[in-house]
Image (cartoon, rainbow, N blue to C red):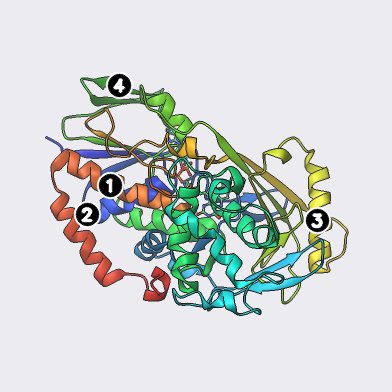
Amino acid sequence: MRAPVIHIIGAGMAGLAAAVRLKEAGADIVIHEATAQAGGRCRSYYDATLGITIDNGNHVILSGNHAALDYLQLIGGRDRLRSPESAVFPFVDLASNERWSLRPNDGRLPWWVFAADRRVPGTRAREYFGAAPLMWAGPEKTIADVMSCSGLLYERLWRPLLLAALNTDPAEASARLAAATMRETLAAGGRACRPLIAVEGLSSAFVDPAIRYLEAQGISIQYGRRLRTLGLEQQQVVALDFGDDTVQLTPGDGVILAVPAWVAATLVPGLQTPSEFRSIVNAHFRIAPPSGLAPMTGVINGTVEWIFAFRDRLSITISGADRLLDTPRETLARSLWQEVSVITGLATTLPPWQIIRERRATFAALPGEDAKRPSAVDTALDNLVLAGDWTATGLPATIEGAIRSGNKAAQAVRKKQYGQSRDYDRKTEHRHIIGAAPQADRGRA
Ligand SMILES: Cc1cc2nc3c(=O)[nH]c(=O)nc-3n(C[C@H](O)[C@H](O)[C@H](O)COP(=O)(O)OP(=O)(O)OC[C@H]3O[C@@H](n4cnc5c(N)ncnc54)[C@H](O)[C@@H]3O)c2cc1C
């Protein structure tokens, strides 16, 4: 008789996190990925138009994202991320041409709001505390229900930060999700909100090391395996139908379904998931950044929201970008470059460019959509758990949320199938003690 196997469907951040946790705990796993590449919405690829490797979209994690940092530490990807020594966010206002740097102090006591050279120009210290009601807002509240969504401080601080975190217009977004993000980052002090960027590409930090980690343990991802249907009998998954091949499960086998919400909804009968999504637009320009340009610059009063400077390109990000989905690509590239050239001083001649529009980048972080997120563990099927940034993580759709969901799914599937949680917990605990990320990276003030 063979040992029980855990099948992981989907090799995005959630599926990979579940896989490395399970492998670490000694479980037998098989990973099935629909496409020819791992990483899902967080991946790099060779772009033939530009002749360089780029990311599907610029991703930032913050030093308070402890699950993401633990994952990177475990797989060996941590040193692929770069961050400033302290939390510094350079901004430029295209309307007024003002430039400033937001510089939260390291500790939890936010004295930076009292320092004019650390806070947003034109704002007063007491205005910052206007965001405090977020922290006790109920799940049905939008951000606009509990704090002012207008004025200089909102336009120059809260709007850009919350839009980046939630990928949804902050005024209509969930106050509870905003608070969850704030609690673990800005409210935890500058030490928890240093931005970390994968300077050599997302895959080099988040994906390739995970694949190497798994391969060293004899696991290779099975690509081109799109799960079509789940064979079900008496609240159990008994078969996985991949179209040209069906895998029969035996008692003791488990399934982690780590696919996007819209796929999970078609596979699991009766499953409620978020069903409204928001897009993210990225434009990549193949040009060397001018010297002195920060790795990441926030832009106010532009279509461009963030500029990222990589060795061989400038990349820009626009969140909640559904309004741009139908703009002709070249028109968009030209108008975005116009803004970039004003900000950077580079020539107005359009360099080689690429536009990537991720239509369903994240679920819409609205109170109503947040309420639809299912528990990863309490599914109607005894041997199936869910993973993904859209499950009920309490966070917006982020790498941190996806990795936490993968960790939770790994733990839950073992509890469900083998009652081995105690072993699993002990091993996990041990790793936290010997392999934890440096204190500063874990966001403790
Ligand atoms: C442009 C962009 C920018 C972003 N920026 C940030 C950021 O700055 N910071 C941040 O923290 N987060 C950011 N995010 C969000 C982050 O990328 C996601 O939250 C995270 O990658 C989601 O991981 P996941 O594993 O939950 O889902 P996915 O990445 O969607 O992974 C699901 C996997 O399942 C596979 N799959 C689908 N159907 C099947 C099937 N039937 N059978 C087998 N496999 C299947 C898919 O191919 C995919 O590999 C951004 C997202 C985008 C798109």
Q: Earlier in the sequence, mark 1 or mark 4?
A: 4
Q: Earlier in the sequence, mark 2 or mark 3?
A: 2
Mark 1 is surrounded, within 10 Å at the Cα level, by few (under 14), some (14 to 19) or many (20 or more) other residues, namely many
Residue 251 at x, y percent in the picture: 16, 30
Numbered circle sitting on residue 231: 4
Which amino acid lies under the numbered mark 2 shown in the image of this protein? Ala
Secondary structure under tag 1 reads helix
The answer to whether 27 appears left or right of 371 in the picture is: left
How many numbered circles are shown? 4
Q: Measure the alpha-carbon separation of dots 3 and 1.
A: 44 Å
Numbered circle sitting on residue 25: 2
| Depicted 204 relative to depicted 409: above or below | below
Q: Nearer the viewer, mark 3 or mark 4?
A: 3
Question: Residue at left 24%, top 44%?
Answer: 412
Q: Nearer the viewer, residue 410 or 150?
A: 150
Which amino acid lies under the numbered mark 1 shown in the image of this protein? Ala
Q: Which residue lies under the disc numbered 1?
A: 410
Do callouts 1 and 2 mark residues in contact (Cβ within 8 Å)?
A: yes
Q: Measure the alpha-carbon separation of dots 1 and 2.
A: 9 Å
Numbered circle sitting on residue 337: 3
